[in-house]
Amino acid sequence: MTDFRICDECGEKMLPETTEQKFHFNGKDIIIKGLNVYKCQNCENIVYTSDEAKMIERLIQAFDSKPAVDILNLEETAKYLRVSNQTIYNMIRDGRIKAYKVGREWRLLRTDIRAYLEESSNNTAYKIAAKGGQITEHDKAIICEEIKKRNND
Ligand SMILES: [Zn+2]
């Protein structure tokens, strides 16, 4: 049985490997060794397993001096999950993610977004945009997006 994922960048096969990754954050370098990832054999795109992504998120939060904003609007949520505004809107509409309407604007709680990620973590992997080894302000929390569901186990 081969364990692989399909690359969401180029559609080629991604194979499991163990690697180390350097994150530059708040003027510090954090090197994490022994990370279990899937790496694209074609374009070198990397995705982390969901457990690893959560661990990295917690680590990064520990290094972050500013408290995270707990209420996000639609655009911020899209940025947070690395998807389009339309995708978030669709997720709200079909009830996949919880949202509250304040006037004409949607508001989402970070805890609800996390709950959604927890729920979907069995079928999806999180992709951390750390290809360049840098974490920017935008990237600082979870930095992830859903990739194609594996349907050919
Ligand atoms: Zn690829």
Image (cartoon, rainbow, N blue to C red):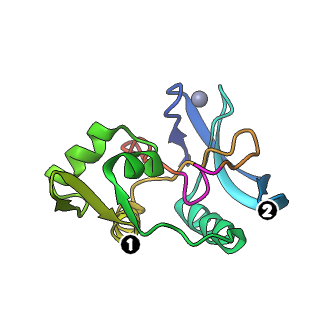
Q: In this view, does 41 lie above or below 55?
A: above
Quarter of the rendered structure image containing ligand 1? top right
What kind of element bears circle 2?
Answer: strand
- Under mark 1, the amino acid is Thr
Q: Which residue is drawn at 68% across and 68% down?
A: 64
Relative to 132, 152 lies left or right: left
Q: Which residue is drawn at 53% across and 34% down?
A: 7
Relative to 109, 101 lies left or right: left
Q: Which residue is drawn at 45% across and 45% down?
A: 79
Count neighbours of disc 1 (C-alpha within 10 A) and say few if under 14, some if 14 to 19, many if 20 or more: few
Task: Report how far apart the C-alphas of labels 2 and 1 lie in the structure.
Answer: 26 Å
Query: At which x and y percent is residue 41?
Result: 66, 31
| Segment colored magenta | 137-143
Frontmost residue, 6 versus 129: 129
Residue behind mark 1: 111
Frontmost residue, 100 versus 33: 100
Query: At which x and y percent is residue 93?
Result: 15, 50
Query: At which x and y percent is residue 109?
Result: 34, 68
Main SS class of the magenta portion in the image: loop
What kind of element bears circle 1?
Answer: helix
Residue behind mark 2: 32
